[in-house]
């Protein structure tokens, strides 16, 4: 079945550092891909999305490119802020409209 | 415009009891989804309702059920609560438009079973 794999473990980095969170997927066909963010004590917010190969989603300084050849959708930000501390989930939309999520990565940005 | 709203925000129940969680979708959205976010298990798909009908169900026992009302709001019912049902229950809504559907999530209901 369809699945999403995110890199293991939390990510701790200093303010203004470069952030990368890896996401790879297994799917039949060409799913839509998403990054969601969950701030402490809150629900999920859609951060960015891409619907076809080579699409680049971007929002709030975050970017991710839909790479069909490597089945990846890595999240990047050039200069993180303390306010970016949150849990980030990679997800794909399956044909039946359900979202399959990765396990999430806790990002902690230290001032 | 109001987002997806869920109630209650927090809930404590005893094992064996029953619970009902509520969700109001974004105005105009016809689809409602329920997800369970349990510690260590990530986000698991529970149920999808569209136009009042159950369209898809995740790998959960029958004691998890729900419904969608004519105004597109939805309830999730969990019977015979077990300790492992403790989780954040998230509702999302979307508008079916061809192949691509963007889901907007509510703040969730934190259920604790003791």
Image (cartoon, rainbow, N blue to C red):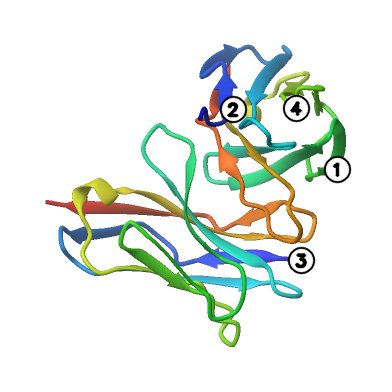
Q: Are marks 4 and 3 on the same chain?
A: no
Q: In the rendered image, is residue B112 in sight?
A: no
Dot 1 falls on which chain?
B
Viewer-nearest residue: A16 or B103: B103
Real-space CA distance between mark 4 and mark 3, rounded to the nearest whole angstrom: 30 Å
Location of mark 2 (residue): B86
Residue at x 72%, y 12% (from the top left corner): B17
- Element under disc 2: loop
Real-space CA distance between mark 1 and mark 3, rounded to the nearest whole angstrom: 18 Å
Real-space CA distance between mark 2 and mark 1, rounded to the nearest whole angstrom: 25 Å
**Where residue A111 sits: x, y (%)?**
11, 51
**Where residue B25 sits: x, y (%)?**
64, 30
Tag of residue B72: 4
- Element under disc 1: strand
Q: Are marks 4 and 2 on the same chain?
A: yes
Viewer-nearest residue: B112 or A37: A37
Location of mark 3 (residue): A1
Location of mark 1 (residue): B55
- Element under disc 3: loop
Dot 3 falls on which chain?
A
Real-space CA distance between mark 2 and mark 3, rounded to the nearest whole angstrom: 27 Å
- Vertical placement of A58 versus B102: above or below? below
**Where residue B70 sits: x, y (%)?**
82, 22
Residue at x 40%, y 32% (from the top left corner): A41
């Amino acid at each position: 079945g369809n699945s999403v794999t995110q890199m293991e473990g939390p990510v701790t980095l200093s303010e203004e550092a470069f952030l990368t969170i890896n996401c790879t997927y297994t799917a039949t066909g060409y799913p839509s891909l998403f990054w969601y963010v969950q701030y402490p004590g809150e629900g999920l917010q859609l951060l960015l999305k891409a619907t076809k190969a080579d699409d680049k989603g971007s929002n709030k300084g975050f970017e991710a490119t839909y790479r069909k050849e490597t089945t990846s959708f890595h999240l990047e930000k050039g200069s993180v802020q303390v306010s970016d501390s949150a849990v980030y989930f990679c997800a794909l939309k399956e044909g039946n409209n359900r979202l399959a999520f990765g396990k999430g990565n806790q990002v902690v940005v230290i001032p | 415009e109001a987002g997806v709203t869920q109630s209650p925000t927090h809930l404590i129940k005893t094992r064996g009891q029953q619970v009902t969680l509520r969700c109001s979708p974004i105005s105009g959205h016809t689809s409602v989804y329920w997800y369970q976010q349990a510690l260590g298990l990530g986000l698991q798909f529970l149920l999808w309702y569209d136009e009042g009908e159950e369209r898809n169900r995740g790998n959960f026992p029958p004691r998890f059920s729900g419904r969608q009302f004519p105004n597109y709001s939805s309830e999730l019912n969990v019977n015979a609560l077990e300790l492992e049902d403790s989780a954040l229950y998230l509702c999302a809504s979307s508008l079916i438009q061809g192949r691509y559907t963007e889901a907007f999530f509510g703040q969730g209901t934190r259920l604790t079973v003791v």
